[in-house]
Image (cartoon, coloured by chain):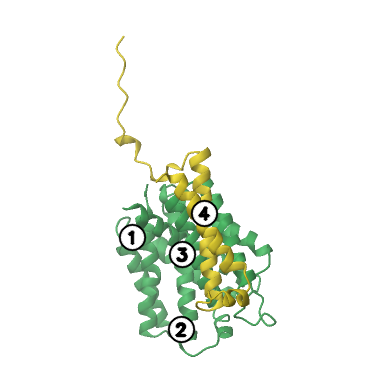
Chain colours: A yellow, B green
Amino acid sequence: MNKAVVSVITAFVAGIAGSILTFVPPQVIRSWGLDFGMHDDRVLIGVFALVICVVAVYKLLLILFGKPEKAFAAPARHAKKPKKRKR
Amino acid sequence: MSRIWTAFIFGIIVTLAMNALDMLYHVVTDTAVHLNYVAVKFTIIFATVFLIALVIGRGKTPGIVTSVLGPVAFYFYYSVASPTLDRSMFTIDEAVWYVVVHVIALAIAYLLAQSFVVKQKGGRLPFAILVSLAALPLYWGWLMALVKLGGGLDEDTTKVMTMGAAFLSLAILFVLIYGATWFCKKGHFPGFAAGLVFGIISVITGATVLDAFVRIFVIGIPYVLAHQLKGAA
């Protein structure tokens, strides 16, 4: 699947889940039947999901508008040198 | 070294160093250093540093994004989660101002790790600073865990370290680690040797053998991890 599509889906799902778990009051979450663990545990998981959402959006922006950092790129010494043209 | 492992080590070292700077700021400004919040802070900041290093990479722009995103996510947690410490007795870092403090601490730790240790610039000094900063929260957390294991309350863990003791511990850790890098440039042995000296010092000053044994790893683990980061692409 296209990386941009994966980023969009990840950002959307993580953003929705994170927002619900973090910002919806515990009473409402309980009424929806989503009350796993303690309130603080749900908030922590929600914050994780929000971080994943932001990272996915950042990745999407890089795919669309910029270049990723070269931190994990192969060292330059392994790259083949371009051949000189003979005139 | 695999990409995940490099990002994992980088996340651990940067988060520990950031926590050390933050804890020092707390003791200087007389705000509580609470075990639960330190644990949550470590988890959230680590997740941010790790995910961005893994998915995006490391560098100037990811460093800035990491430095801002981690503390902001942490502030969300603070604002929404139920308090586990009596706020009428203890001041903790939940004010908006502390987001800026956390951003600065994380940026310094990130810069130190990425621009000096990973790129191997500046020699032994940045390495020793980073490892001693990374070792301090482990040591501090161990002392807080000891209080908690001994039946102490959450409030008691906030009184484990005074400002003088915190800076003295950091100075001892730095001297030991810097000395270890002089002793041997390569390998993981110097880290554990420094930890052993730290353990012996603690036994002489009245600590138990178990406490001394743990202190070997308090220095040894960050030393080994930071050593693996040297030159990591």
Q: Which residue is mark 1?
A: B183
User: Depth-wise, is mark 2 or mark 4 nearer the camera?
Assistant: 4
Q: Nearer the viewer, mark 4 or mark 1?
A: 4
Q: Which mark is residue A11?
A: 4
Residue B20 in sight from this viewpoint: no
Q: Disc 1 or disc 3, which is closer to the eye?
A: 3
Q: How far across and how far down the image is residue A33, in percent?
A: 53, 76
The reply, left or right, for residue B231 in relation to residue B142 is left
- Residues at marks 1 and 2 on the same chain: yes
Residue at image position (49%, 85%) is B148
Chain that bears disc 4: A
- State the residue position of label 2: B146
Q: Are marks 1 and 2 in contact (CB under 8 Å)?
A: no
Asked which secondary structure carries label 1, the reply is helix
Taking the view exactly as shown, the residue that stands out farthest to the front is A32
Marks 4 and 1 sit apart, C-alpha to C-alpha, by 49 Å
Q: Which residue is mark 3?
A: B134
Q: Amino acid at mark 2?
A: Leu
Is disc 3 placed on a helix, strand or loop? Answer: helix
Q: Amino acid at mark 1?
A: Phe
* Left or right: B92, with A67 as reference point: right
Residues marked 3 and 2, same chain: yes
Is A50 above or below relative to A82?
below
Q: Are marks 1 and 3 in contact (CB under 8 Å)?
A: no
Tell me the CA gap for discs 1 and 3.
Answer: 20 Å
Residue A44 placement (x, y as % from top left) = 53, 69
